[in-house]
Image (spheres, helix red, strand yellow):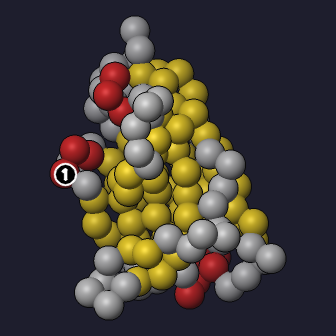
Amino acid sequence: QVQVVESGGGLVQPGGSLRLSCVVSGSIFSVYAMGWYRQAPGKHRELVASITHRGQTDYTDSVKGRFTISRDNAKNTVYLQMDSLKPEDTADYYCNAGQLGHVGEFVPSPDNWGQGTQVTVSS
């Protein structure tokens, strides 16, 4: 059974940085496409960034140029480096081990969610 564990959240001032980590165990990490999602209070969960098993990345427009997703297959870990953080980035951040759809989009697996890590951007 796949286990997904996120870490690295916290409280940071606007303009600051955080790096989230997500460790996947119980399966072959390198075959998965990985996605970072976030969910703010009262809002739907949204895909923030994704990375294919080959390292191709994609970002939602609101984080382009500020967030960087990367993966280390030797450590079964995917990272989300978040720079120039804004109050609107405040949310619970979730990792998912998924796959690519027919047109290359990230498709989350319903069974492969982590418990989330909270990010608060506030002065």
x then y, percent, for residue 12: 46, 21
**Pointer 1: what residue?**
61
Q: Secondary structure at mark 1?
A: helix
x then y, percent, for residue 87: 34, 22
The number of numbered discs placed on residues in the rendered structure image is: 1
Horizontal arrangement in the rendering, residue 106 relative to residue 1 (left or right): left
Between 60 and 80, the residue placed more toward the observer is 60
Horizontal arrangement in the rendering, residue 32 relative to residue 64 (left or right): right
| Picture quadrant where residue 104 is located | bottom left
Horizontal arrangement in the rendering, residue 7 relative to residue 92 (left or right): right
Q: Residue at coordinates 28% horizontally, 59% vertically from top-left?
A: 59
Which kind of residue does numbered mark 1 sit on? Asp
Whether residue 42 is visible here, answered yes or no, is yes
x then y, percent, for residue 14: 33, 20
Q: Residue at coordinates 37% horizontally, 26% vertically from top-left?
A: 16
Q: Quadrant of the N terminus?
A: bottom right
**Above or below for 13 versus 64:** above
**Above or below for 102 versus 85:** below
| Picture quadrant where residue 23 is located | bottom right
Q: Residue at coordinates 68% horizontally, 85% vertically from top-left?
A: 28
Q: Quadrant of the C terminus?
A: top left
Horizontal arrangement in the rendering, residue 26 relative to residue 7 (left or right): right
Mark 1 closeness class: few <14, some 14–19, many ≥20 residues within 10 Å: few
**Above or below for 78 versus 84:** below
Most distant residue in the bottom direction: 102
Q: Residue at coordinates 19% horizontally, 51% vertically from top-left?
A: 61
Whether residue 19 is visible here, answered yes or no, is no
x then y, percent, for residue 56: 32, 77
